[in-house]
Amino acid sequence: EVQLVESGGDLVQAGGSLRLSCAASGFIFDDYSIGWFRQAPGKERKGVSSISNRDGSTYYVDSVKGRFTISNDHAKNMVYLQMDSLKPEDTAVYYCAAAPVYRHYIRGGVLLQAPEYAYWGQGTQVTVSS
């Protein structure tokens, strides 16, 4: 059974940091890319960052470049999202999702469209206070 379990969400002040974790199981880790998405109240779910577990290549949307860092740990089947210099507009439920890694290369390394992802976690709440 495929499972993605997020953790690490919390309430933090603006300028602070959080590290989100995504524990993956039930599939061959290297055969998938992992994306982080977020959904604020009343807004659509949007992609934030993705990583190919095949070669470690990453992508970030402009709004988080230089502040967020995605990484993976093959030994633990984990993907992390380090979030620094957090802003109130980063407040959202954050989800990790898994897509077959070939989609990463078909999309030229930009894999942040939700329909591309087959598996989703339950989400973790990140709240940034001003």
Image (tube, rainbow, N blue to C red):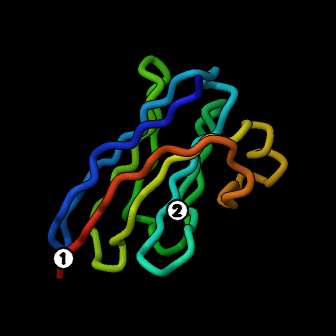
- Give the quadrant of the N terminus: top right
Taking the image as shown, residue 94 lies to the left or right of residue 55, namely: left
- Indicate the position of residue 14 as horizontal and vertical percent values: 19, 74
- Residue 16 is drawn in which quadrant? bottom left
Badge 2 local density, few (<14 within 10 Å), some, or many (20+)? many
Question: Mark 2 and mark 1 in contact (Cβ < 8 Å)?
Answer: no
Q: Secondary structure at mark 2?
A: strand
Closer to us: mark 1 or mark 2?
1
Q: Which mark is residue 103?
A: none
- Indicate the position of residue 106 as horizontal and vertical percent values: 84, 48
Comparing 60 with 89, the one in front is 89
- Indicate the position of residue 96 as horizontal and vertical percent values: 50, 47
- Give the residue type at disc 2: Val
- Residue 99 is drawn in which quadrant? top right
Q: Which residue sits at x=45%, y=17%?
A: 75
Q: Is residue 67 above or below residue 28?
A: below
Q: Residue furthest toward the top?
A: 75
Taking the image as shown, residue 62 lies to the left or right of residue 13, namely: right
- Residue 127 is drawn in which quadrant? bottom left
- Indicate the position of residue 90 as horizontal and vertical percent values: 36, 72
Q: Which residue is mark 1?
A: 129
Comparing 74 with 119, the one in front is 119
Q: Secondary structure at mark 1?
A: strand
Taking the image as shown, residue 54 lies to the left or right of residue 123, namely: right
Q: Which mark is residue 48?
A: 2
Q: Which residue sits at x=59%, y=37%?
A: 56
- Give the quadrant of the C terminus: bottom left
Q: Is residue 2 above or below residue 36?
A: above
